Amino acid sequence: MKKAIAIVLVLVATAAVVWQFTKGDGKPTTTYRFVEVQRGDLEAVVSATGTLNAVTTVQVGTQVSGIVQSIYVDFNDRVRRGQLLARIDTTLLISAIQDARNTLDRNIAQRDYAQVELDRIQALFEKAYATEVELNKAKYDLQVGEASVKSAEVNLERAQRNLSYATIYSPIDGVVVERNVEPGQTVAASFSAPQLFLIANDLSRMQILASVDESDIGRIREGQQVRFTVQAFDERQFEGTVRQVRLQSRVQDNVVTYTVVVDVDNATGELLPGMTATVEFMVERVADVFKVANAALRFRATEEMMAEFRARMQAQREASGDTTRSRQGGTPAAGQGAPAAGGQATFGGGQDGGTRNGGGNRTMLWYLDADGVLQATFVQTGLSDGTMTEISGRNLEAGMQVISGISQADDGGATANPFQQQRTQQGGPPRPGF
């Protein structure tokens, strides 16, 4: 019994080996990967990031030092121009006014005394009882007294103005975006005015300050349409318009960028200052065109595919007795634009992820016809969005399946990883941009 089972197992194993080799003659089995030719719109965009801000913001500070006595507004409060925002303690400021007023009174008294002395010495000088030196000294004392009065008047005016600065009013109509002080806090205005509030003029109109790479800034222009998203509403798209391309550049980590200002309508108030916006600048758009995934344009036929293709073309030409150039089913015949061994037509469609290419950017798409026979056709490439590229040519139709890669099964039936790049013998590495 055991001997019979062993014989059966040997026969099964032998049959499996024979089937494997007779099935493929010991050669790898080729499986194609396909992508679909689609028809629709295609857009080329330049992507960037930026921050939403109010168009006009005003920093409200204080020119005097002191303790914040009262605050009359809070975050998000709407204020009107001239509305009271805060008050700083005025004790020291009132004292400074009183001191300046006393100084002024003293200087006025000194000036009046100098005037009386000048009149007295002038009368004595006319009677020859006073010298000219005494007269000049009296005139000098009067001039000094008048200058001291003017200086004291300026000091008094400054002290009064500082007292008015202790009461802080809103300079514009708007919304309080920031409040940086609390009652009882001491503010010092020794070198610069500390910011107490930040007021945005009108949040119904906002702007995005987007940083655009120097390689893309040449494709940005004023009036260009923009769409963007924010993380708070990641499923929605907002629109805007380029208002300004600033000439000042910024260098960070050896990368040069330029600031582009985008106007945004925020009538609903959903967009808030400080939100990060992912921006797409609409560079170019085409409507109702054929487009295909860039993987199909990067595909290079293997030597076996090229040999099969040339042999079939040669057989068709000999069968028809035609030695001239011909095409069958939109496929280039041998000797008529058909790729030579180890080569393929070059292409440049959309290599920068968003440019419109002129004529001469030609490549080949490979596909299987209705009978499962390998075919190829030339196409012109056009606009690209970095993923899909516009194509035009003969015998194209929506839903057409074109080859984007191959997977090969070895003698043991193991299939190569379909995500691993396939190495081919044609024409070197694919051109960049796909």
Image (tube, rainbow, N blue to C red):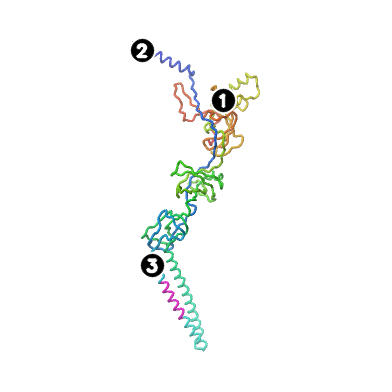
Earlier sequence position, callout 2 versus callout 1: 2
Disc 2 secondary structure class: helix
Give coordinates of residue 31: x percent, y percent. 49, 25
* Residue 69 is inside the magenta segment: no
Specify start and end residues of the magenta stretch as a single range. 99-113
Q: Nearer the viewer, residue 26 or 377?
A: 377
Say if residue 381 shows up in the picture. Answer: yes
Disc 3 secondary structure class: helix
**Please, is residue 277 above or below residue 104 in the view?**
above
Specify the label residue 334 is tagged with: none
Estimate the spatial distance between the alpha carbons at disc 3 and disc 1, rounded to whole Å: 94 Å
Say if residue 208 shows up in the picture. Answer: no
Give coordinates of residue 52: x percent, y percent. 47, 49
Residue hosting label 3: 92
Residue hosting label 2: 5
Q: The disc labelled 3 sits on which kind of residue?
A: Leu
